[in-house]
Image: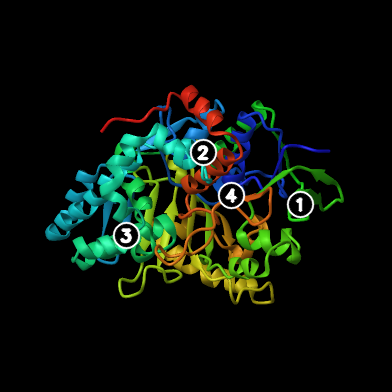
Amino acid sequence: MSVDVIIIGSGIGGLTAGALLARYGKRVLICESHTIAGGAAHSFDRKGFCFDSGPSFYCGLGKNRPSLNPLKQVLDAVGESLEVVPYDPLGHYHFPEGTFPVYSNLEKYRQTIAQITPEGAKQLEKFEQRFLDLYNCLKDIPTIALRADWQLFPVLISGYLPTLAKMLPQLSVVGSPVGELMDREVRDPWVRRLIDLECFLLSGLKAEGTIAPEVAFMLGERTRAGVEYPIGGSAAIVDALVRGLKRWGGELRLGTHVEKILVNSGKVTGVRLRKGETIEAPVVISNATIWDTYSKLLSKEDLPPSYRKESLNTPAVDSFMHLHLGIKAEGLEGLTGHHVVVRDAKKDITEPGNTCMISIPSVWDKNLAPEGHYVVHAYTLEPYEGWQRDDRYQEKKKERSQPLYRAIEKVIPDLRSRLVLELIGTPLTHSYFLRRDRGTYGPAIPAGKGTFPSCHTPISGLYRVGDSTMPGIGVPAVAGSGILCANTLVSPQQTQELIKDLSFVPQAG
């Protein structure tokens, strides 16, 4: 069997690349090791409760077109859409000194901050304006138009020259860490911690390690498009991408584990499956992590030794502890869906167990839980080192899940008496079920101290997508990686025709 493109893994990066390449007319085959598509964004069911395994916060997925969300741009391109529920406030932050709502509208958000620190709110406004100025330039260049080769430059010059001119004053900001801009504008220690928290939620790193465009898009889109939850959760997103892939002739094979990427004389020739089948293709795209791709899917001699060593030494974001709970909902009618709890103000927000993220999506989508119940998903950083499936594993799971329980109890004090289902996930769970090296969510490359590897590799015909190729650990970043890779494999003219079909033209202002 032979195809034009083989994609290893059906995470969001692999699905967006595959669906888009199928839309371009390529014969695409996606091989997924597991029986469920979606990678770190898949959903799963237990006893009538439907849980999101990873992402829980979404923006710009509604029916308004054009959208600046890369994922939505791909869905538009393949003729798919999602039903969403908008909401505001987008969540609540729970600090030791108090709880406050986080609004999509930045003016309303700053009014909330002003009740805590009036001077800090003024400093925050100046800080945010620097990023909104950058956003107002970047938003005029849709991700769906971009590619990851030299042909990007004529594309930008021919189609977006006015925007490039407008961006010139912002060039010093584009590559800057958020921390540098924070140091210039914000002195209030409480607001500085708030900015660190939002950067951490966005990229897995604090302000000093987060690149400015990530925050620019987060602030701009949060205000412009608001936030919403897709009915059906992350499974609805995955299903829409799979439908789009198949609509344009692509194929997804579940339960199909790729054992090896085949390379001959520095060129990809296809893949070998665990069951022994060989599939030929001139292009292979790996949606596995950089560590799994280069240490497991390729033979050691396939890569230049120095490149391989440097790539495998890429620092990684820690793994996570997860709680997936089914609870009784009686008396919780006013509950909101997103919460972030910082448990100890004296500890660093990145310390495992100190910052806990909580999602209760059944407040928007009642179908995710049996009648009269809610689903709860909570998670916090947890190092992979020290975890092993020994006699203490079950005891350690219980012990390391307690910070998450105590965080949820800030929101639902009588949580434990409401429990009807408990699932505890560890870094070993991540590593095993998601096939991710050390259970990580991706590289921890601080802004200004290294660059992400992009989709290219030293092997002709081998490309990569996913969170190992773009800054940020969120869905827009991995969807963007799929777009850049797919566009790089076709002509700029094909991409331009697609953009015209989407009616995506540069916006004024």
Q: Regarding mark 4 in the picture, which secondary structure is present there?
A: loop
| Closer-to-camera residue (224/455) | 455
Numbered mark located on residue 258 in the image: 1
What's under tag 1, amino acid-wise? Val
Q: Nearer the viewer, mark 1 or mark 2?
A: 1
Residue drawn at 65 percent across, 43 percent down: 37
Q: Nearer the viewer, mark 2 or mark 3?
A: 3
Residue drawn at 31 percent across, 75 percent down: 346
Numbered mark located on residue 178 in the image: 3
Q: Is residue 443 above or below residue 481?
A: below
Could you tell me if the residues under marks 2 and 3 are in contact, i.e. CB atoms within 8 Å? no
Work out whether residue 399 can be spotted: yes
What's under tag 2, amino acid-wise? Glu
Estimate how packed mark 3 is, as few (under 14), some (14 to 19) or many (20 or more) residues with alpha carbons within 10 Å.
many
Colour scheme of the rendered structure:
rainbow
Q: Regarding mark 3 in the picture, which secondary structure is present there?
A: helix
Estimate how packed mark 4 is, as few (under 14), some (14 to 19) or many (20 or more) residues with alpha carbons within 10 Å.
many
**How far apart are the two marked residues, 2 and 3, measured between alpha carbons?**
44 Å
Q: Is residue 160 left or right of residue 328?
A: left
Residue that mark 2 sits on? 371
**How far apart are the two marked residues, 4 and 2, measured between alpha carbons?**
39 Å
Residue drawn at 16 percent across, 60 percent down: 120
| Residue 244 percent location from the top left of the image | 61, 30
Could you tell me if the residues under marks 1 and 2 are in contact, i.e. CB atoms within 8 Å? no
**How far apart are the two marked residues, 1 and 2, measured between alpha carbons?**
41 Å
Q: Quadrant of the C terminus?
A: top left
| Residue 26 percent location from the top left of the image | 68, 32
Q: Earlier in the sequence, mark 4 or mark 2?
A: 2
